[in-house]
Amino acid sequence: MELDEVMEQRRSFRALDGMEMTDDMVTDLAEAASLSPSCANNQPWRFVFVRKGPQLDLLLGTLSGGNYWARKASMVAAVITKPELDCRNEEGDYHWFDTGMATGLLLLKATEMGLLTHPIAGFDQKAARKVLEVPEGYELLTLIIFGKRSMDLSGLSEKHQKQETTRPERLPLEKIAFMERFQGE
Ligand SMILES: Cc1cc2nc3c(=O)[nH]c(=O)nc-3n(C[C@H](O)[C@H](O)[C@H](O)COP(=O)(O)O)c2cc1C
């Protein structure tokens, strides 16, 4: 698949079918993320991949009600970082930026592999950290839901059915891209 096609096909779909997530698939995803740029090559991203089993059941039990659709996930990847793992200066820290970029590559790789991915922030932080045994000082940024895309939308709410077939609207380019100097609001 060409890059343009991968970017176009990546969507946060919610209608999921189960599938087997092999060790090789997990390695391919982690390798894609590891190729991401980072400040001073600090690579502040950490991922925990949780596949089918009691640990996944526990993790899915931390999801908020609005993420009911994710309970069919075949795998969840937890995205973790901490400020001390990356460049820090007076203007701010770079660990979120760098971890976000690596996560973007992981999402694109997964899309190229034909997987459905959907990042979520709607989960009980405290409970999820406990399940994943995330040490204090580390930040659990998001959970990425993995599965196989299903065309059966019957398990989704009306709102989610609509979002499944229509890409959420993007800001016009004039609002996000400028020439020569910042001209945003
Ligand atoms: C950090 C983050 C948190 C998100 N949290 C949720 C969530 O809790 N539940 C959900 O259904 N979608 C969640 N999303 C998905 C976004 O709603 C989705 O990416 C956005 O609407 C754009 O749609 P697209 O990914 O299909 O292009 C989240 C996405 C990101 C990046």
Image: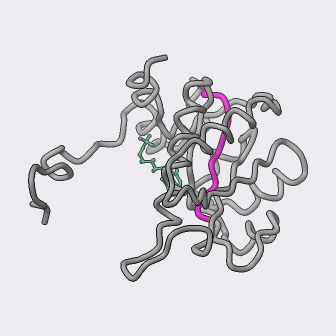
Residue 119, how many percent across, how many down?
56, 49
Q: Relative to 179, is 94 on the left or the right?
A: right
> Residue 9 or 60: which is nearer the viewer?
9
- Of residues 39 and 14, the one drawn nearer to the viewer in this rendering: 39
Q: Is 86 positioned to the left or the right of 72 in the image?
A: left
Say which quadrant the C terminus sits in: bottom left
Q: Is residue 149 magenta?
A: yes
Residue at 55% of width from left, 48% of height from top? Answer: 103
Please identify the quarter of the rendering in which residue 72 is found.
top right
**Image point 55% across, 29% down: which residue?**
111
Q: Residue at x 64, y 55 (%)?
A: 143
Q: Which residues are magenta?
A: 141-150
Asked if the stretch drawn in magenta spans residue 172, the answer is no
Q: In the rendered view, tell whether residue 69 sits above or below residue 78.
A: above
- Residue 33 is situated, as x and y percent measured from the top left of the image, at 60, 43
Can you give x and y, in whole percent of width and height, for residue 41 in the image?
55, 55
The part of the image, by quadrant, that contains residue 99 is bottom right
Q: Is residue 139 above or below residue 101?
A: below
Q: In the displayed image of the protein, which residue is found farthest to the front? A: 40
Q: Of all residues shown, which one is farthest toward the right?
A: 54
Residue 40 against residue 130 in the figure, above or below: above
Number of callouts in the render? 0
Figure colour scheme? one colour
Q: Main secondary structure of the magenta part?
A: strand
Q: Position of residue 59 (x, y in %)?
A: 77, 58
Residue that extends furthest to the top in the rendered view of this protein: 1
Q: Residue at the location (44% across, 18% down)? A: 2
